[in-house]
Amino acid sequence: MYTRIGDFMKFKEIAKKAIIEYDLQVASLEFLIEETNIFYLIKTEKSEKFVLKIFQEESSNINDNLSEHYFLGVIAEKTDIISPRVIQNKKGETVTKIKFPNKRGYKRTALYQYEQGDSIYGKEDMRYFRNVGKMMAKMHIATYDLVLPDYVNPKKWGKIFYYEYEKAIYKKKQYRKFVTEEMIEILDKLIPYIDTRLKEFYEKTKPQLIHADLNPWNIKSRGDKFVIYDFEEAMLGLPIHDIAVFIYYYRNHETLDCFKIKKALFAGYESVTKKPLNINEKDLELIMMARRINFFNYVLFLRKDPAEYINLSFPRIKEYYLSYK
C-alpha cells in the first residue's frame, strides 16, 4: 500500500546508505526539505554541514546531474560567486547510485557543501537587481567559448518542452475540465511558432552553459553577499534565456516596477561585461512566454487542481497571442 510516510522512510534509508560512500564522520542526519527532489541535512563531528540530494526520476537524468556538477566546478574556479560545492564520493564520483526498487533499480544521490542563505523575495531593492545582473554576467563570461568534456551532455533550450520525454498534454481528455477549446486553439498556434523562433536563436549564436532557472528563490543573501542555488536545470542556452527567466517572475509584479528592475539588472550586467546588452524586447517576451506555456502544461500534470494557475496564466498567454499574431 502506498503511503507518503512509507516513501520518506525509504528515502531516509537511501540517505543512510549514501553517506557511507563518503569520507565523513557523521554526527546527525535529518530531513531538510522536499522541493521536487528530497534533501537531507548532514552534520559531522567536526561541525561541518552538508546537504544530500536524492534526485527524483521525473526531474532529471544522469546527464543533467553531471552537467550541473560540472557547471558548479566552473563557477567555483572562474568566478567569486558563492554556490554549493559538490563533494566527490570515495570513488571520485559526484553522483552516487543507491539500490532502490524502481524501474532503474537505483536512486541517484549527490552531496553538496551546505551554504546558508536568507530569502530576499519580498525585500528586493534596486541594489539587489544590479547585483543579480553582475552575477549573471560573471556566469556567462565563465562559460563563453567553454569546451565541454565528453562526459558533459546538457540538454538544450531549443523548444518549449525541452525535457527528454516531455510532451504537450493540454489536449488530453482528462484535462478538459480545466482546458477550454479556446485555450487549445491558441496554444496549438503559439507552440510551433515559438519553437521555430527558439530554434532560430541557435542558428545565429552558439549556445553556452547557463543556469536556466534563476528565479527569486534560487538567489539568497548572506550579509552583503549572495548565494546562488539549484543548478540542476543547467543547459545549453543563451544569456538572454537566464535574463528572461529572472524577469519572468517580476513581469506582472503587483508592487515592483518591471521597467526599473530591467534597467537595474542590465546596468549591473553591463558593468561587468563593459558592453551594452542590446536585448530585443520581443525576444525577451518570447522566451518568457515559452516558460509560461511550459508551466501551463506542467501544472496540469503536477497539480490535482490546476484551475487557479490556469485561469491566472491563460489571459496572459492570450494577450501575447493577440499582440503578436
Image: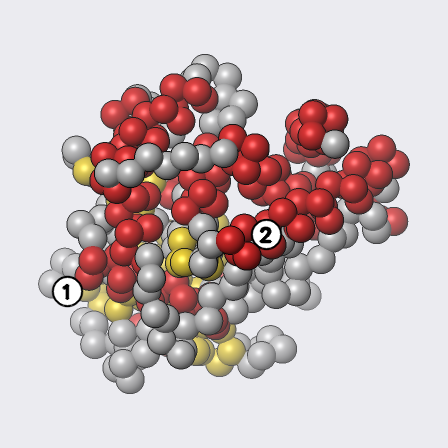
Image point (43%, 20%), residue name: 259
Whole-percent x, y for residue 82 in the image: 22, 49
Q: Nearer the viewer, residue 204 or 8?
A: 204
Left or right: 319 with respect to 164? right
Which residue does the numbered mark 1 point to in the structure image? 45
Q: Quadrant of residue 102?
A: bottom right
Kind of element beneath mark 1: loop
Q: How many marks?
A: 2
Tag 2: amino acid: Glu
The residue that appears at 27% across and 74% down in the rendered structure is 88
Labels 2 and 1: the sequence-earlier one: 1
Three-letter amino acid code at the position of disc 1: Glu
As helix, strand or loop, the secondary structure at mark 2 comes to: helix
For the point 84% across and 38% down, which residue is it? 185
As measured in the structure, the alpha-carbon distance from the residue carrying label 2 to the one carrying label 1 is 53 Å
Residue 1 picture quarter: bottom right
147 versus 72 height, above or below: below
Q: In this orientation, does residue 122 appear?
A: no
Circle 2 sits on which residue? 200
Between disc 2 and disc 1, the foreground one is 2
Residue 8 x, y percent position in the rendering: 50, 61
Tell me if mark 2 has few (under 14), some (14-19) or many (20+) residues whose alpha carbon lies within 10 angstroms of its own. Answer: few
